[in-house]
Each structure stands twice: as C-alpha cells, then as structure tokens.
Image (cartoon, rainbow, N blue to C red):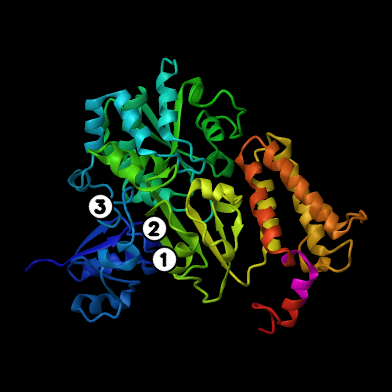
Amino acid sequence: MTQTIVRISDDALARAVGADALAAAFEKQGCDVQRTSSWGMHWLEPLVEIDGKGFGPATLADVDAILSGTSDRAIGAIEDHPFIARQQRLTFARAGKTRPLSLEDYEGTGGWSGLKRARQIGSDAIIEEVTRSGLRGRGGAGFPAGIKWRTVANAVGDRKYIVCNADEGDSGTFADRMMMEGDPYALIEGMAIAGEAVGALKGFVYIRSEYPDAIRKMERAAQLCAHIIAPFEVEIRVGAGAYVCGEETSLLNSLEGVRGEVRAKPPLPAIRGLFGRPTVVNNVLTLSAVPHILGEGGANDYEALGMGRSKGTMPIQLAGNIKHGGLYEAAFGVTLGELVNDIGGGTHSGRPVKAVQVGGPLGAYLPPEQFDIVFDYEAYTAADALIGHGGITVFDDTADMGSMARFAMEFCAAESCGKCTPCRIGSVRGIELIDRILAGKETGGGRQPDRIELSPVMQNAPKRGRTAEEEIELLTDLCETMKFGSLCALGGFTPYPVLSALKHWPQDFTGEAVAERELGTVPGGKGA
C-alpha cells in the first residue's frame, strides 16, 4: 500500500503555531511527512498539503478528517488559491514546493544553473547582465546592484569580500527569514555568483541572533554545498541584537569584532569595506534574485517587469492588523490599496484602515487617501515615504498616531549607536517634545499628564511658556535637523513616521481626540 505523502512547512512561523506536533500526528497515522518551505500564506498556517491540495489552518483535531477527505479546512489546489495565483514569483519561485536542505530538490528546480553559466561567461558579462536587469538593492536603499558590483570589481585589493546583510530588524518584515529557512541554496548561489563577478573567494552572512532556525539552516546548507561553490566559501556570523547593525558600515564593524556603530562615508565599503578591503554588501533578497537573472534569458525577463527604474519583482510582506498576512511577491507597480484591501483582505479586526506604515519602524504612515500610490522607489520618495525592505504594517481606526509618533522617537533613542549628535540627542529631545505636546502642558487644552507615561526628564520639567503650536514647530525643526544631519538612516529616517503622523492625523496630538474617545463619539472609544 502506497503511503500518503503529507507536506507541512518547517518555517519558524508554521512551527510556532503547531506544525511540529501536526507533522508528528500524521506520522503516527503512517503518512510520509515531508517538511517543506512555506508558501507564505501565514494566516493559513499550519498548512497541510496532500496531492497539491491544501488544508489550513489545521489543528491536531483535523488530522482524521483531512485524511478521510471530509475536512472543512480544505482550500483547494494551493497553486490556484487567489493569493498565490496573482503573484509573479521569481525570488520565491520554490516557496512551498521544495525541502529546504535537499540538494536534489534544489538542483531539480533549476538550482546552480545561474552559477554554472556565470562561470562560463566571466566577470564583465555577469556584471553587464545584473546591470541590464535593473536589479536594485532590496534592503531599502534601492542602489543599483550592477553599479556596486562594477565598483568592487574595479577596486584594487589583495582580497575582496561578499557580505550578505541578513540583519532583518524592521517591524513587519520576514522575507529574509523565509528565504534563509526555505531556500538557503538560492542565497548561497547568489553570493557565489557575486564572488565570481568581483573576484571574491569569501562570503559572510550576517544573521540576527533572533533567527535561530535561519542560522541553523544556513550553517547546514553552507556545509552541504561547499563542494559545489568551491573555491568560493561562505561563513555564517550571528549578530548581537543591535538594530543599527542593519546599516552596512555598522554591520562591517560588528563582523570585525568591534562596536557596531556607523562609519563616516567616504570611503564607501565598495572601496574600503570589511577588513579594509573592497566589499560587496547586499541584502538577502538582492542576492537571492541573482540566480534567476543569470539563468538563460533571466536578465531580459527581470528587466521586462516593473515600472520606471524599479525593475523586477519585490517580495512584499503584509503584517499588522491585516486579514491575510503573509508574503506576496509581485512586480513593481501594484498600488498600496490593492495590497492592503484586495490582496490583504483589509483589517483582521474588521474595522476601517486608519494608517499603513511601509518600510519598517522608520517608514512614513500613509492614510487611505494615499492608497493610489504605486509600489515604486521614486513614487514613494515623491510622497515623502519609503519602500524600505518591503514591509507593510496595517493599523485600524483605533490606533493613536500621537503615541505612534512618540514610539518612533523612543525607538531611535533606544537603538542609536551614539556616533552622531542629531540621532543620539535629537531622539531624546524628540520624546520630550512629543510628551509636552500630548500632555498639553502649556495650553491646558491637550491631554492631562497622567494620561501618558512621561519620560524621566519631563516628569519634573518646568513649563517653558511655549504654546502647542510652537512645540509642534520646534518638533518639525528638530526632525529636519535629524533628517539631514544624521550619519545614517536610523536618525535620518526617524522623522518620516513623526512628520507623517503630524500631517495626516493632527487631531491625535490634541486634547479634542482624547475627549471624544472618552465620550465614545469616535470609533474605539469607551462608549463605542
């Protein structure tokens, strides 16, 4: 009798909601359980697949019904599910389909073909194809990968390095983790191709310590494929939890064993990077896109997708208060409204969307009135917003944007490396300013001090005689100083959430919003 093949993801999110216990239950029923990568439909995890058909979210109580074909958890053929069928998966083409550490699965789905071709065509041709594809850094900066690679290839150095920035610290982002856990060989192949292009024989993957599953997978994958990528070699390094080490020069300092703080530029890492040598620093998603681009005709396919200078696809991560959270890979050009409402299904709470933050904790808050903005680097820049790492966090109408603005400053103060004054001091002053605005200390018309937890400095601070309008003007000036005076994006981008909250939801910084919420006259109030 043929065993029933049951496929269940071993992705960290699936495991967190019971995938391991579910897999063990199917094994007890005599099934052949295969642990695969995740499809990225997180609201359906743990997702069970049998003969291409899905069941989820599945529990231990559903095992018998799933095997007998009577389960009400059935979602039909997974590849036909609207969430999957509408995508254009290139970087995540293997998601849900392969066993992460299986060399057989990887090679059987086109793995290593990009590296083989790269070794045939040589450095100049590799860089030319990456440049022609239009691939830009997916870590947030959006800098053209081909230009960076050409700079390192032309730089003089006795050794060169490839560094993969896997310090995925932005809120609402998980694509790097999914790639490392689900398709680690694709990342390693991309690094080996980059090494072939610039003349580097050594690569480092810097992974945040909060990703134990990804660390384990990457270490094992590097061992299993060492004979394939040789003479190039990959070493896995683990960070220590500092958000600022997501910035490339702080990351390089950490790799060298010194304090993770920002370096002044120039010199650029491409000229003098790790251990003073020319270094390519790229994000996980950037390097993982390279094997497809180096495949036969891949550069042309990639360049044909997207819009303007934003070419190819972007793995977009839907998170926060959203009904259908997960990973959605699509060509640039999809609107924010489509992502949140059509694809994401609106809020999980069922309440109206109030704000969407794109680009992590330092991204701007966008109101529904701006949902026509298309996913494109230049379009977001024009709207004083950021694409960042492609994370989208949704908030419903109960969110307090004054508190969210304060959180941005508090986050910056906690995570600042301390190297530059605008970030180190500006963020602390920003907290104090927002505390005064929210407390209404000068006008008497705002919130009462006991409504919020004031910073220690502000608890006994004397009145300064400024009106709320003057405090807001001072906060705006401070944000401008941080934006243009900080050494790196931590201090430079913190003003985005603060200023966008002030612009679109000024009522959340005044006493009127609080009074109305207490009376129950606005959604989310005590009387609602």
Which residue position holds label 1? Answer: 343
Which residue position holds label 3? Answer: 99
CA separation, marks 1 and 3? 27 Å
Callout 3, which amino acid? Arg
- Which residue is pictured at 32% across the width and 74% down the height? 60
Count of labels in the image? 3
Q: Which mark is residue 328?
A: 2
CA separation, marks 2 and 3? 20 Å
Callouts 2 and 3 close, C-beta under 8 Å: no
Q: Which residues are magenta?
A: 508-515
- Which residue is pictured at 75% across the width and 64% down the height? 509
Decide whether the magenta segment is chiefly helix, strand or loop: helix
* Residue extending furthest toward the bottom: 527
Characterize the local packing of mark 3: few (<14), some (14-19) or many (20 or more) Cα atoms within 10 angstroms: many
Callouts 1 and 2 close, C-beta under 8 Å: yes
- Which residue is pictured at 44% across the width and 53% down the height? 174
Q: Which mark is residue 130?
A: none
The mark nearer the N terminus, 1 or 3, is 3
- Location of residue 236 (image quadrant): top left
